[in-house]
Image: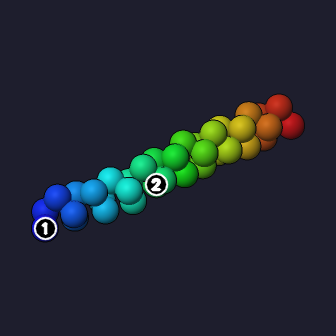
């Protein structure tokens, strides 16, 4: 039971981590654009 929960949590955390990296990249690009303007 715990193994199944662990696998599901990993499957959820991996996409969340990728989304977080993408959002962080977009956020930094927006900040750099605002600083240039």
- Indicate which disc residue 1 carries: 1
Numbered badge on residue 10: none
> What number of labels is visible?
2
The nearer-to-camera label among 2 and 1 is 1
**Residue 12 x, y percent position in the rendering:** 39, 59
**Does the image show residue 5?**
yes
Observer-nearest of 17 and 27: 17
Q: Residue at x 27, y 57 (%)?
A: 7
**Quarter of the picture holding the N terminus:** bottom left
Please provide percent x and percent y for residue 6.
22, 57
Residue visible at 60% across and 45% down in the picture? 22
**Residue annotated with mark 2:** 16
Is 23 left or right of 20, judged from the image as shown? Answer: right
For label 2, count other residues whose C-alpha is less than 10 Å away and answer few (under 14), some (14-19) or many (20+): few
Q: Position of residue 15 (x, y in %)?
A: 48, 53
Nearest the viewer among 1 and 26 is 1
- When asked about the image quadrant of residue 21, the answer is top right
Q: Is residue 20 visible?
A: no
Secondary structure of the residue carrying numbered label 1: loop
Alpha-carbon span between mark 2 and mark 1:
23 Å
Q: Residue at x 73, y 34 (%)?
A: 32
Q: Earlier in the sequence, mark 2 or mark 1?
A: 1
Eyeballing the image, is 15 above or below 31?
Answer: below
Tell me: residue 7, above or below residue 31.
Answer: below
Q: Are marks 2 and 1 in contact (CB under 8 Å)?
A: no
Residue 37 placement, left or right of 16:
right
Q: Circle 2 sits in a helix, a strand or a loop, which is it?
A: helix
> Residue 3 sits in which quadrant?
bottom left
Crowd tier of the residue under label 1, counting other residues whose Cα lies within 10 Å: few below 14, some 14–19, many 20 or above: few
Quadrant of the rendering where the C terminus is positioned: top right
Q: Residue furthest bottom?
A: 1
In this view, the residue farthest toward the right is 37
């Amino acid at each position: 039971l715990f193994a199944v929960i662990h696998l599901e949590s990993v499957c959820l955390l991996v996409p969340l981590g990728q989304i977080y990296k993408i959002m962080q990249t977009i956020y930094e690009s927006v900040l750099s654009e605002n600083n240039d303007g």
